[in-house]
Amino acid sequence: MKRTLANAVLFQLMWFVCVQGHNALALVATVLALLIHARFWVTKHAEWQLIAGFTVMGFLFDSLINTAGWILFSGSLRVTNSTVPVVIAPVWLLCLWLMFATTLCHSLLWLNRYPWVSVLLACSAVPLSYYAGGHLSGSVLSQPVVIPLLAEAAIWAILLPSGLRVAGKIMDNNSPRMNTND
């Protein structure tokens, strides 16, 4: 129970660090947090694959939302050499996705037993998080603000239960464990 709570607290601390919108600070803090995560939580190699995959998917979706102009994340990278301008989400948001992914096999794993609860949380808590994080980071949500928040809710209503299902399979007792003597 203490480890689960510590995982949730670590994520919340990192959320506040990341949404300040400072790419370098978020990157350094994320590297340190991932080292802590590796030391105290990771027991299976497959968890790193889940963290990577979930992060890439989320980051791509947020870059798409950024490109569409629904949320203009502060610190984004605009690529204009193509016929279709692309706006890549900032490093601090990549770090936030990484840190959220670290909760799937630990503090949020209990939600795997209740997929509808995870969908409800995705549709309610996530838009609130994006709204607050947008203001703290200096990002701009398009008007009417309900459009980007509904887009995030829809994305998360698919990603969160899917990520939790994979996490549940990773953490079941039949999955191979890491050799901690390495």
Image (cartoon, rainbow, N blue to C red):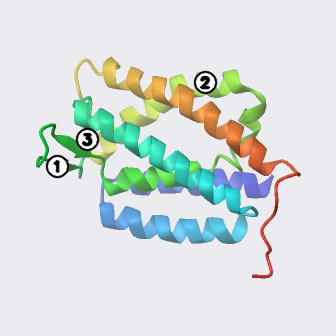
Residue annotated with mark 1: 79
Q: Are marks 3 and 2 in contact (CB under 8 Å)?
A: no
Q: Is residue 167 or residue 4 the one in the foreground? A: 167
Q: Which mark is residue 100?
A: none
Find disc 3 in the rendering and name its residue. Answer: 139
Nearest to the eye among marks 2 and 1: give it.
Answer: 1
Q: Nearer the viewer, residue 84 or 74?
A: 84
Residue 102 can be seen, yes or no: no
Q: Position of residue 96 (x, y in %)?
A: 45, 51
Mark 3 and mark 2: span between their CA atoms? 25 Å
> In terms of secondary structure, where does tag 2 sit?
helix
* Disc nearest the viewer among 1 and 3: 1
- Numbered marks: total: 3
Q: Earlier in the sequence, mark 3 or mark 2?
A: 2
Residue toward you, 78 or 144? 78
Q: Which mark is residue 119?
A: 2
> What amino acid is labelled 1 in the image?
Val
Query: Considering only order in the chain, which callout, 1 or 2, is on the residue closer to the N terminus?
Result: 1
- Picture coordinates of residue 2 (x, y %)? 78, 56
- Secondary structure under tag 3 reads loop
Answer above or below: position of 41 versus 39: above
